[in-house]
Image: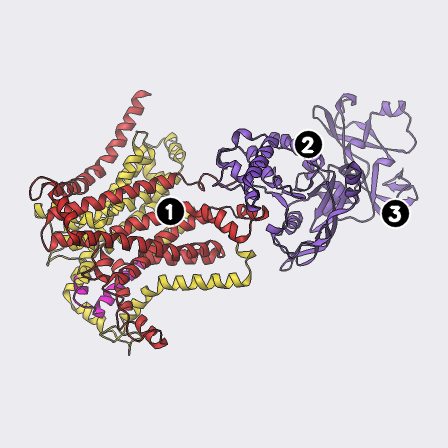
Chain colours: A yellow, B red, C purple
Amino acid sequence: MLLSHGSLGWKLKSSLYIITGVIAAFLALPIFFIMALSFGSSQWLVFPPPSWTLKWYERFFDNSQWIESAITSLQVASLTSIIATLLAIPASFALVRGQFRGRDYLYTFFTLPMVVPVVIIAVAVYGTFLNLGLTGTLFAFVASHVIIALPFAIISIINSLRLFDKSIEDAAVICGAHRIQAIIKVTFPAIKPGVISAALFSFLVSWDEVVISVMMASPNLQTLPVKMWSTLRQDLTPVIAVASTLLILLSLLIMIIASFVRKQSNHH
Amino acid sequence: MFMISSRKKWNNVTLLFPIILFLFLFFIIPLASLLLRSLTEPTFGLQNFEQLLATSTYVQVLFNTFLVATLVTVISLLIGFPLAWCITLMPKGWGRFLISIILLSMWTSLLARTYSWLVLLQSSGIINKTLMAIGIINQPLEMVHNLTGVIIGMSYIMVPFIVLPLQACMSAIDPMVLQAASICGASARTVFFRIFLPLCKPGLFSGALMVFVMSLGYYVTPALLGGVRDMMLPEFIVQQIQNFLNWGMASASAVLLILITLVLFYLYLKVQTDSPVSSNTGA
Amino acid sequence: MSLQTNTMTQSPLVCLRELNKEYGNFTAVDHINLDIRKGEFLTFLGSSGSGKSTTLSMIAGFETPTSGEILLNDASLINIPSHKRGIGMVFQHYSLFPHMSVRDNIGFPLDIRKVAKDERDKKVDEILQLVQLEAFADRRPSMLSGGQKQRVAIARALVYEPEILLMDEPLGALDKKLREDLQDELRLLHKRLGITIVYVTHDQDEAMRLSERIAIFKEGEIVGLGTGKDLYRKPPNAFVASFLGNSNFLKINVTGAASAQLDKHHIILDDLHVMPINQQALLMIRPENLQILTPEQAKNEALINGFNQISGTVNESVFLGESLTCSITIPSGEQLISKNIATEQPDLEPGSTVFIRWNSKHSSLYSKWEQSDINKNSAQ
């Protein structure tokens, strides 16, 4: 009754749809709102805009600072994604397959960067890198982003490894394959969706990171969110709406790829 | 036999070596040295903590932080509960569609979403204009650069973190249990309060705790939507470092924030394992 | 007192009148009429989708009938919500409240009815004793075995002394041994409390073991209603015959008031039949009512009056311990299955000729049937 759709009266049913619609709109509209505004002609972001234009896009792509920061973002996010995934794969194997004590504690430890407020990680890493003279380098960006990407990568790979029946790998070994060979030829293809989504979410975490990046940035090296951040603190120019739209589109693309990968793995 | 098993163990630890080394170098050492600074800068002692508790600004900051975190948790619960319930009630396809909207909102750039609210809530923004056009208000409401803006923006961001665990919890409830309560004589109201709500408790609790913890440590949204006067703890920490280079004070506040966070996280882990729903599906 | 109960058993407690439930174009329950007597143990027996559970749900109030009437003590239940019907119900998957202890689960209906605490505790203790769960009173349902959970569910349904107890395949999730134990417990419980029970199952053995009356459901209709013994011995139609136990079906031509033609054989029928003469009909004989005789036995033992005898060839005989089943082909090409107590039966080699005898009183005759009714034969 409270949990079955079929037995609701029409009054309850219609109010249910209305509530859901309103809340879904509340969640989705700000995203589409900002994308629409990036095409609006109003400097003051009036909505609905007086007319539609591409001039903010021209401004964005004509400005080398925006372009460079976007390229840096891509570089940092790609490197973060690769390194986080490469660190997470062996760790996940050890956590899922290992028989040693304290595995749960280690798992909690690896997911700790997700729990500790990002601002504290940012400040801590900033303090250390400042002393080492590393701030403002690509290394600093990647190293700090990997910290917060790791929990996502590990959770995603561990989940797919847990679902994988290890006896299939053992079967390959009985058939004469070396353990490493069996892992590469049998286990890895099976957990590939998990690994891919680990890489995708690591990319997304880095691509979207603001606080840490703001700390790591220098006038010469900054990511797109940092550039947005510093611009935002001065004014609300629609160029930021353009940058936001680009961020949103990339997030959307990655979400679609991730759900596609998940669907594929469900078919197996 | 013994040889093989001991070799395997050794192998497993080797696999963990890179990640442990990495986290140690870039996470634990920086974190530890930050926390240590609260005791060592400028000189060794508890002076930073004493100063913190003596400063009225700091007390105000702490108050703001907890106020915002509490209000955000309550508001996102109020929005998240009906939404989670709707998703559970909706026919399968619709439910999945709603979940993907939530995931989309969750994984969309935080900065973009905050910016969007900044534009929506500004005094010449669409919300103020609509309200004035309808005639509810005569003057634009001040909804940004104060706590109102922070609370609206953060609630929006936190709703998915309530909905996802809560929805998982709700869909694990056996609908027949509710029918059983009804045939035992319980009215719809009683079924809701005595059966349905208690069964949702683990989901509600873990969602609320997660949102509360995240809200305590949130920086971006309060910094953009909030005002200068009503600062929250994370902003205070950054300000101490960026503006005053006062690492001692920043570290002391960081110690406090991290302590609160870890205690609440510990509670969160406890709640998750004690879930009565996960241990009983009825069948 | 006993006299009063006696008269009470005559008047129906629940009446279903032209009860109908449709989902779009699909008719789940097709205008059924049924009287449920006070104090009886009635079982709805049918395969899945036969409408038995839907009927139960309508009595409980979880489904609203498309049309028709449900009367409890002559008052309509149609517009009364589940929680005001005062009916007890036990669900297939127990449906205990996972967040409450056993004691609180059982006490829940009493709390709803605002029973005073002393009385509530007393009643809960009594019923805990009845289902032998005193030792588990403070456990959560997740810490109980399947059988214990089901006992809690029964206790919860009985504690407020409802006039009628509905049970929806309550033992379906348990393994065979436990199921049989609980069936016996349940039968004793019913005898002790004298409560009216409506029980839904797809398991014919369970229906036979438990119930006083059985209603057999097929495609939303009740196609057989009566005691297990009557339904088994004199099935009202071919479906009931094949659904309840095993059966042999033979196509015959009715030639007279008590005679018929089976292939080239002349056979006698029970003279109580009301079939039209010179038409095809279906003869049903239970496997255990077929006697198998070797040619010598047939020669030595004279055919008793009212018995039929035909010849056949043994295909296969299987020794099952207490009984021996034998599959035999008769001259018309049809196959018969016999089942006899093994100790009295000679060994039958495949290919050997045998004689089959049966008492004409132990056969049933149908003028109408569907092929699908017969095909279910040994599938059950």
Helix, strand or loop at mark 3: loop
* Residue bearing the label numbered 1: B205
Residue at 65% from the left image edge and 48% from the top image edge: C56
Quadrant of residue A177 within the rendered picture: top left
Quadrant of residue C176 within the rendered picture: top right
Query: Taken as a whole, is the magenta stretch helix, strand or loop?
Result: helix
Q: Crowdedness of circle 2 by 10 Å Cα count: few (<14), some, many (20+)?
A: few
Q: Crowdedness of circle 1 by 10 Å Cα count: few (<14), some, many (20+)?
A: some
- Which numbered disc flags the more N-terminal residue, 3 or 2? 2
Q: Number of callouts in the render?
A: 3
Residue C218 seen in render: yes
Q: Quadrant of the N terminus of chain C?
A: top right
Which residue sits furthest bottom? A50
Q: Position of residue A241 (x, y in %)?
A: 25, 67
Helix, strand or loop at mark 1: helix
Cβ atoms under marks 2 and 1 closer than 8 Å:
no
Residue kind at label 3, given as amino acid type:
Met
Helix, strand or loop at mark 2: helix
* Residue bearing the label numbered 2: C188
